[in-house]
Image (cartoon, rainbow, N blue to C red):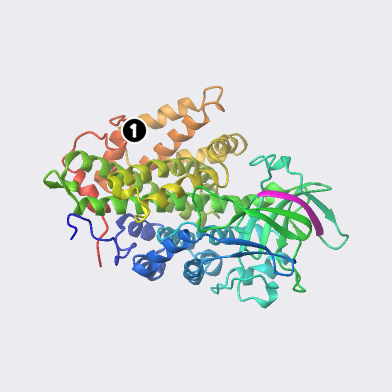
Amino acid sequence: MSFNQAPPLVDYNLFESDAVLRESLEREGGSWAHDLVHGLGRLAGTQEAIDWGFQANANPPVLRTHDRFGERIDEVDFHPAWHELMKVAIGHGLHALPWREPRAGAHAARAAAFYVWSQVEGGHGCPVSMTYAAVPALRKAPGLAAQWEPLMTTLAYDPGLRAPATKQGVLFGMAMTERQGGSDVRSNTTRAVPTGSDGEHLLTGQKWFCSAPMCDAFLVLAQAPGGLSCFVLPRVLPDGTRNHFHIQRLKDKLGNRSNASSEVELDGAWAVLLGQEGDGVRTIIDMVNHTRLDCVIGSASLMRQAVAQATHHAAHRTAFGKLLVEQPLMVNVLADLAVESEATTILMMRLAGAFDRAAAPLEAHFRRIGVAIAKFWTCKRAIAVVAEALECHGGNGYVEESILPRLYREAPLNSIWEGSGNVNALDVLRAMQREPDSVAAYFAEVESAPKDSRLERAIAKLKNELTGGDMESRARRLVESMAVVLEASLLLRHGDPIVCEIFCASRLEGGWGHTFGSLDTRPDLRSVIERHRPRFD
């Protein structure tokens, strides 16, 4: 009979156990969605939902290119657990909440719900996220939006390739990158040839990363006669025949194994122009910005689940005569991880609130630069947080029966998807150069915090750094500083006072080493752990 083992972290409510999220949801105007997020939090903590996450990753999708008669079908088969996860996500509106309920706090409410449910399993969030993000891009063409949006915003999960008009709901994906260019989409070679009918084109070429090829339609970039353009490409044509969209193979990825990512070949695939010809990047950028928000949410979600697992384990595991959570050095590590998680969650919810309030120019400008800053920084921090939380478990954290290896494999994804670290750091510089109002909005935000000499010194130093030359080679350092200053400002306004003090003393003043667990000794570190440790129902 085993002893000195932490009980399974199951049958708890992920929302009720997360004080930072509860406070943030209220502050950002999403309290009307309390019951929705509470219900998801309860379901996410059940053994059934946890099992779905493990099963979906242990049984990854399988590609079937042809049927038994040799005809191309290009279908992807998923384990039933994947469909259960998707059914919950779509049924709770995680793909469409702000478009279904365009009210104050809708993006914040959706962010909180997506954050909670993603802790169960991250991979299925890909088609959910892209469907959410495709709507604002489609709205640039009212006719296409009228055709697709009613199906994109239903609460019915209806998998399978059929004519869209015969389905209860549809999902959207994205196909931008190609082998020769990656993030440099202007080097794309996929051709779009007009048919002569109102915006209709035939697309021919290959896409190196097509996210979620089982979706019903995609936003695709291709070279039209007038330059790089954006198109809506359905998998099944209105008459029920399959479009010429051929899945070459599924990617064998480090993580995100429950989800299908693919290489595809377009062989005269029928598509309709979205936006102006030659304006493809500008057209699809709304989708990219919304998916970048979801990269931040996903990173915050990974951090939160890792911290929940680590603090729970340490509260029940004994070593050398004391609980781990009573060991001074482990207390330092856990408190440091919790501080990072709290800062990220508050930043995530502040950005979601900026999406809600984007009609106000100041909020729109802050959103523009804030998303790129947060995408760069939080996605990198998630990798370090998950690794340290795994180590808190020792060998128990390194085996697949725990969720930590899956979280660890998933963590780098958000930093790569929708632009790697360099791409996002340079995007911050681009915003500063082309949209100077975004810089003004950033400083208006960080300078609105209560007076704190450490933050004031950090802001002054940052302003000085932004006046120097050769900013491109220093972009990562600059954006890192902008992110830490922004998090400190938010914590001063909204965080737990002890968490805020630790963050400012360590991240701003330098009372910190190069690893988690190198905080200055304080008597109140245990209280930070208790704030973040999950509680059973």
One can see residue 448 in this view: no
Residue 70: give x, y in percent of width and height.
Answer: 74, 66
* Range covered by the magenta-colored residues: 200-208
Three-letter amino acid code of the residue under disc 1: Leu
Q: In this view, does 29 lie to the left or right of 432?
A: left
Q: Residues within 10 Å of mark 1 (few under 14, many from 20)?
A: some
In the depicted structure, whether residue 7 falls above or below residue 223: below
Q: Name the residue under label 1.
A: 508
Residue 59 screen position, x and y as percent = 49, 61
Give the quarter of the figure containing the C terminus: bottom left
Which corner quadrant of the image does residue 196 belong to?
bottom right
Q: Where is residue 76 in the image (x, y as percent from the top left)?
A: 61, 63
Of helix, strand and loop, which mostly describes the magenta segment?
A: strand
The answer to which image quadrant residue 218 occupies is bottom right
Could you say which is closer to the camera, residue 260 or residue 421? 260
Of 247 and 287, which appears nearest the observer?
247
Residue that lies at the very extreme toward the left in this rendered image? 321
Q: Which residue lies furthest to the right in this view?
A: 196
Q: In this view, does 478 lie to the left or right of 400?
A: right
* Coordinates of residue 354 in the picture (x, y in percent): 49, 52
**Of the pair 190 and 286, the residue shown nearer to us:** 190
Does 146 appear above or below 112? below
Nearest to the observer: residue 68 or residue 454: 68
Q: Quadrant of the N terminus?
A: bottom left
Would residue 465 be seen by someone viewing this image from the given angle?
yes
Quarter where residue 23 is shown: bottom left
Q: What element carries label 1?
A: helix
Q: Is 112 colored magenta in this rendering?
A: no
